[in-house]
Image: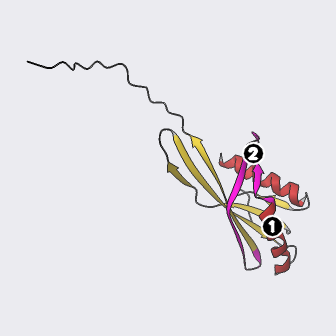
Amino acid sequence: MLPNIIDGISNRLSEAFGQSYYIYGDKDVVQGLSPPCFFIAVLEAIETYYVGKRRYRKYPFDIHYYPSEDGNNAECYEVAEQLLEELEYITLANKDILRGRNKNYEIIDGVLHFRINYNVFITKESNLDNMENIHINSSIKE
């Protein structure tokens, strides 16, 4: 699920900002970045158990934006406002649509940090065998 969400974010960024912005994934080496660019960082994912096979997963992301000029906070604020709108919904490869939650941003050392969660319910496959038939004798002894 996580790689699908990263691809959905990357595709949405490409649609919104065009091909002139390079998008680095969490596996890419971050030395020698070519600004302006985005870096998609995955934060600590959380899974909550529900009844049966259902699980609720929260996938938090920190999307870094490196402006074209160091210290260009105005550019960072402009991109942040655009990200608030553009990343509200992403489409996965299987055509599922996810809504971004808990959106916020800040600028740290000239780099925009845009944080957003994409949360999903999943159904866990079970390999456990179901119990076979059981007979209970419920007669009363005299």
The part of the image, by quadrant, that contains residue 65 is: bottom right
Residue 39, x across and y down, in percent: 75, 63
Q: What element does badge 2 sit on? A: loop
Q: Residue furthest left?
A: 142
Q: Which residues are magenta?
A: 86-111
Q: Residue 72: in sight, yes or no?
A: no
Q: Which residue is mark 2?
A: 92
Is residue 58 shown above or below 124? below
* Amino acid residing under circle 1: Leu
Majority SS type along the magenta span: strand
Q: How is the image coloured?
A: secondary structure
Query: Which residue shows up at 87% across the image and 62% down it?
Result: 21
Say left or right for 54 vs 102.
left
Say left or right for 124 vs 88.
left
* Amino acid residing under circle 2: Leu
Circle nearer the N terminus (1, 2): 1
Residue 122, x across and y down, in percent: 59, 42
Residue closer to the observer: 37 or 63 = 63
Residue closer to the observer: 47 or 133 = 133
Say left or right for 95 vs 48.
right
Could you tell me which quadrant the N terminus lies in? top right
Query: Which residue shows up at 87% across the image and 77% down it?
Result: 69
Say left or right for 104 vs 50.
right
Q: What element does badge 1 sit on? A: loop
Q: Which residue is mark 1?
A: 33
Q: Which mark is residue 57?
A: none
Residue 135, x across and y down, in percent: 28, 18
Please identify, in this view, whether the residue under mark 1 or under mark 2 is nearer the observer: 2
Residues marked 1 and 2 touching at CB (< 8 Å): no
The part of the image, by quadrant, that contains residue 93 is: top right
